[in-house]
Structure formats: C-alpha cells, structure tokens
C-alpha cells in the first residue's frame, strides 16, 4: 500500500494534552490504580441541552475530533472511522440498571440507543452533517490499528482523500469494580508501581480519546507518514522476535533503522514480558514507554500514536519516557508495539513526514 500522512493529531487523556508544549509537561502517575482524563469545558463546544444526553466518551470524542479537523483545516472528512474497546459503557450500564430496576418493563429506549459502540462515530457525523463512510471497529486493544488500516485502504482505493480516524474509551464505576474483582486492575497494596520492573499483576487503568486526520497528501502541518501496520491476535513469547523481525523485513528495514521504539509496559508482570523480549532487539534505538503517563485501557495505543506524532514533528524525546539512555538527534522511524494482557498484538511504523 502507498504511504498516507497523519496531518493532525488531537488527544484528551489523563495528561493535559489539549494544551501546547505537550512533550514538556508530561507527568507520571503510579500511586492511584484508576486515573481519570482531564476534560475540557464542554460548553465551549457542545450545546448544553445536548451535553446532558451525551456519555463521557461521546463528549471527549466530539471535542478531540473538533480539534483534529480544525488543525487539518477540514470541515467535512471523506470518511469517519472510530475504534473503541468498550464503546459507550456508561449508557450500557444505565440501560442494564433500568432493565433490573423496572423488572424488564416500561423501559425508555434512549439509553439502549446511545449504548451502541457506533454512537461515537454517529454523533460526530451528525454534528458535522457528514453523510460519508462511517465505520466503528471494536477489536479490544487493536481497535485504533484496524481503523488506521481501514483509512489507508480508503485512501489507496481512491474512496477518500482525508479520513477522520479516532480511538476512544471511558471508565464506568461498575466496570471498574468488576476489573478490580478479577484482578485486571492492580490492588491498592501493590501501589505505587514500577512499570518497568513490576513483580505484581494487574494494571493502572486510564481513559481517553485520540483523533487524527489521515490524508492522501502531505501538508504543512503533517506529523508523520503512516508506513505500515501489523496485527496479530495471538503471539507466543518465543515468537515475539520473529513477529517484529518479519514486519521490519517486510518494510525493508533492520532494527538499526528504528530510531525510537515505543513499548506498552503496563506494570503487569505477567504480560510485560513481551515488551522485555522486544526491547532486546533494539539496543541501538531510543527505547520508550508511555502507560505510566496514560494508564492502560483498550485504546491506550491512541495516546502513544499521538505522542509519537509529536516526537516526529518536534524532533525531541521526553526524558520521562526513556527506558535506556540512547538519545537521538534525528528521529526518522518510530515503531510502536502494543498489546492488552498478552492478546491482540499490534505493530505500527511511523516515519517523519
């Protein structure tokens, strides 16, 4: 497939990522097991009557997509593609609670209608009055990667020139309780956690929304070239090196050509072994990690893609993300490797635009 460009990037996360000097203002969080996104003042973007009916993920996505389109100078994209792991789980919980409280009778359909995973893409399209291709991917931790892959196909097939691509996930009280019960989320006794040398299982859970405009042509604002994406549902620990090596070979690169590799260390001792295995392949690269900044969640790779875009554009690597001491003056190729709990492995290759 031919190269496409990431022409804008916007993110709402547990960091203050809507403001300027993002790379200089990153702060780590390791003492709380559930961390919430820093939300903007929604009244500046959404009419108050609509805000009441919107779940958090729809509100975050509406604002992040607004910023992404504004930065790219586009009013209506040729396609809207959103990836999400959990969708509108707030409204799903409200609907299920209604079912129980009302003994399955006299239910209002509103929460059910708004609880579907494609509500986010639909609401963005309604706001823009955009009748173009509209699609939602629900593939746990590789939802964004599938969305980016689809945008690449849309552009390569001549179906679109500019595609709005996003990823979004929210926290809900009941789901967080269940995650604590099944030990997905770290026990409070295991905090603070050392993300790189954790001996305990479980993660610190975050949330957020990241949106990008992927275009056919390079612009003055272009952040990166989206070179290639590889996704695999299952990779055994002893297959990690082959999984990455085959991807590099496919793109005519060696490990020495990768200036920075961004790994999804989450503090979960059981599944972080994959990243340790991958790390050993890149002794000459700047090795970075990011989930101590964003928390772990289904579409946390949206945050790493956003940060990678800024690293390529600004040509600087934040010290707070460094694993090794390898500093690079010129960052051309960045490889992102992510999975969630050992499943749904993804590789994304970005190049300086």
Image (cartoon, rainbow, N blue to C red):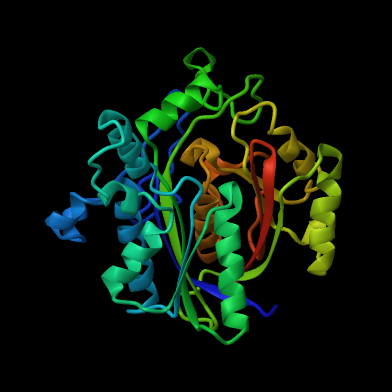
Quadrant containing the C terminus in the rendered view: bottom right
Percent coordinates x, y for residue 60 in the rendering: 33, 52
Residues 22 and 165: in front is 165
Percent coordinates x, y for residue 301 in the rendering: 55, 50
Point 50% across, 62% down: residue: 314
**Vertical comparison of 305 with 106: above or below:** below
Residues 40 and 256: in front is 40
Q: Is residue 316 left or right of residue 236?
A: left
Viewer can see residue 112? yes
Percent coordinates x, y for residue 189 in the rendering: 50, 12
Point 78% across, 68% down: residue: 251
Percent coordinates x, y for residue 191 in the rendering: 50, 18
Q: Is residue 307 left or right of residue 250?
A: left
* Residue lying furthest bottom: 158
Q: Is residue 262 left or right of residue 17?
A: right
Q: Quadrant of residue 66?
A: bottom left
Viewer can see residue 316? no
**Vertical comparison of 90 with 34: above or below:** below
Quadrant containing the N terminus in the rendered view: bottom right
Residues 109 and 166: in front is 109
* Residue lying furthest front: 105
């Amino acid at each position: 497939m031919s190269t496409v460009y990431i022409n804008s990037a916007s993110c709402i996360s547990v960091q203050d990522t809507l403001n300027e000097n993002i790379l200089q203002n990153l702060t780590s969080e390791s003492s709380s097991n559930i961390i919430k996104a820093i939300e903007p003042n929604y009244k500046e973007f959404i009419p108050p009557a609509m805000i009441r009916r919107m779940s958090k993920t729809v509100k975050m996505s509406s604002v992040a997509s607004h910023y992404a389109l504004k930065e790219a100078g586009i009013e209506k994209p040729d396609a809207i593609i959103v990836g999400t792991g959990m969708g509108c789980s707030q409204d799903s919980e409200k609907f299920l609670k209604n079912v129980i409280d009302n003994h399955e009778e006299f239910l209002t359909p509103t929460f059910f209608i708004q609880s579907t995973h494609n509500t986010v893409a639909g609401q963005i399209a309604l706001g823009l009055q955009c009748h173009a291709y509209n699609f939602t991917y629900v593939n746990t931790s590789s939802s964004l990667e599938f969305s980016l892959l689809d945008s690449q196909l849309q552009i390569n097939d001549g179906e679109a020139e500019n595609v709005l691509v996003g990823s979004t996930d929210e926290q809900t009280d009941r789901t967080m309780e269940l995650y604590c019960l099944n030990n997905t989320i770290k026990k409070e006794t295991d905090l603070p956690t050392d993300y790189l040398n954790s001996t305990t299982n479980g993660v610190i859970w975050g949330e957020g929304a990241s949106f990008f405009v992927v275009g056919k042509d390079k612009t003055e604002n272009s952040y990166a070239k989206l070179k290639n994406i590889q996704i695999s549902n299952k990779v055994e620990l002893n297959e990690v090196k082959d999984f990455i090596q085959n991807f590099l070979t496919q793109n005519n690169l060696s490990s020495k050509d990768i200036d920075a590799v961004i790994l999804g260390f989450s503090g979960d001792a059981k599944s972080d072994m994959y990243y340790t295995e991958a790390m050993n392949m890149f002794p000459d690269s700047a090795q970075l990690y990011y989930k101590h900044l964003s928390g772990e969640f289904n579409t946390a790779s949206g945050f790493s893609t956003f940060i990678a875009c800024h690293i390529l554009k600004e040509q600087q690597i934040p010290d707070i993300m460094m694993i090794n001491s390898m500093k690079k003056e010129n960052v051309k190729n960045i490889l992102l490797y992510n999975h969630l709990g050992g499943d749904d492995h993804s590789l994304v290759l970005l190049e300086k635009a």
